[in-house]
Image: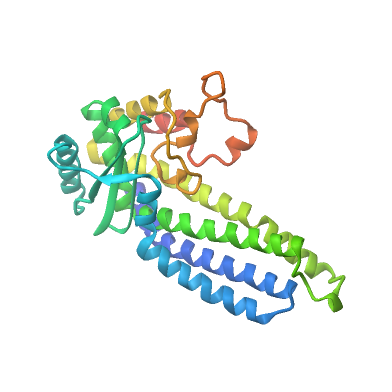
Amino acid sequence: MAANLYTLQGKNKKKTWLLMSLFLVFVIVIGYFVSYYFQSPVILYFFIAFSIIANIFSYWFSDKMVLKIAHAKEANKDEYYDLYTTVENLSITAGLPTPKIYVINDVSPNAFATGRDENHSAVAFTTGLLNLLDKSELEGVVAHELAHIGNRDILLQTVVVVLVGMIAMIADFFLRVTIYGGGRNNDNKGGGPLMILALVFVILSPIVASILKLAISRKREFLADATGAMLTRYPEGLASALVKIEGSAHEMRHVNHATAHMYISDPYSNLKNKDGKKKKPGFMTRIFRTHPPTSDRVKELLG
């Protein structure tokens, strides 16, 4: 089983840059259809330049943007000594540099890792998580987040925040221009099948990008769970932590769809109805959920 796990880790590292390249190509394809729709080659050149710049920006600065969105503050070592000790010890065990440690002032228990590589990484934990979990459970969560760093998940998961947002922004701009004016040249009305295909592709592109993002996140959560369990040699700790996090009655105050896939547990799973009861996930919610069901993750850990 260990050999299979390490094989998956190697494949994951190779796929990270491949998937980033696919996002780049995807944006350029959108640019081609938009330029064809508006009969302007200049738009395609703009999309190529814009996608390259966005990739560079997301590589260098997306982790800072994610931490800011989450309202994360760098943890004081004296105040969070136990947390620092746990992260440092498990980093040594994993053969990783100790990441920067952040704390989010939020009663809802959750955590995530971010950064561009193991030498420029950070882990963030909510105060709710630190107050809820015992030592073995916290070690399980820390090991899970370190696994994301060691498996090179953090670059892709962080960059996806920017790239998916960019695709949604492009599609929204295209639709607004099409609806409210500035559309195709009046001498080229009609368009034909390719023109219809261009319109449909741009409209559906944010959904396609979101599905790709969710598929990436779900697969990597299982691998991070397995790697984290190997690191602590106590899968029961992480399994118990996941159950406690899932059962929390508190909503996250600064939850954001763009970053939800980065957390150890779906931050939208604790949303409540007006009567204060936890919402049951509907059909569309289950399709677009950022994480595999907790019950499946626990079963994999303990099975």
Residue depicted at 34% across the width and 56% down the height: 64
Q: Look at the picture and state if 15 lies above or below 81.
A: below
Q: Look at the picture and state if 284 lies above or below 67.
A: above
Extreme-front residue of the structure? 180
Q: Residue 18: x, y in percent? A: 46, 64
Q: Nearer the viewer, residue 21 or 127?
A: 127
Q: Nearer the viewer, residue 39 or 286?
A: 39
Q: Which quarter of the image is occupied by the N terminus?
A: top left
Residue depicted at 42% across the width and 53% down the height: 157
Residue depicted at 20% across the width and 42% down the height: 87
Q: Look at the picture and state if 173 lies above or below 247.
A: below
Q: Residue 65: x, y in percent? A: 39, 55
Q: Residue 201: x, y in percent? A: 70, 61
Q: Residue 236: x, y in percent? A: 30, 27
Does 162 sit left or right of 193 as displayed?
left
Does 260 sit left or right of 48 as displayed?
left
Extreme-left residue of the structure? 78
Q: Which quarter of the image is occupied by the C terminus?
A: top left
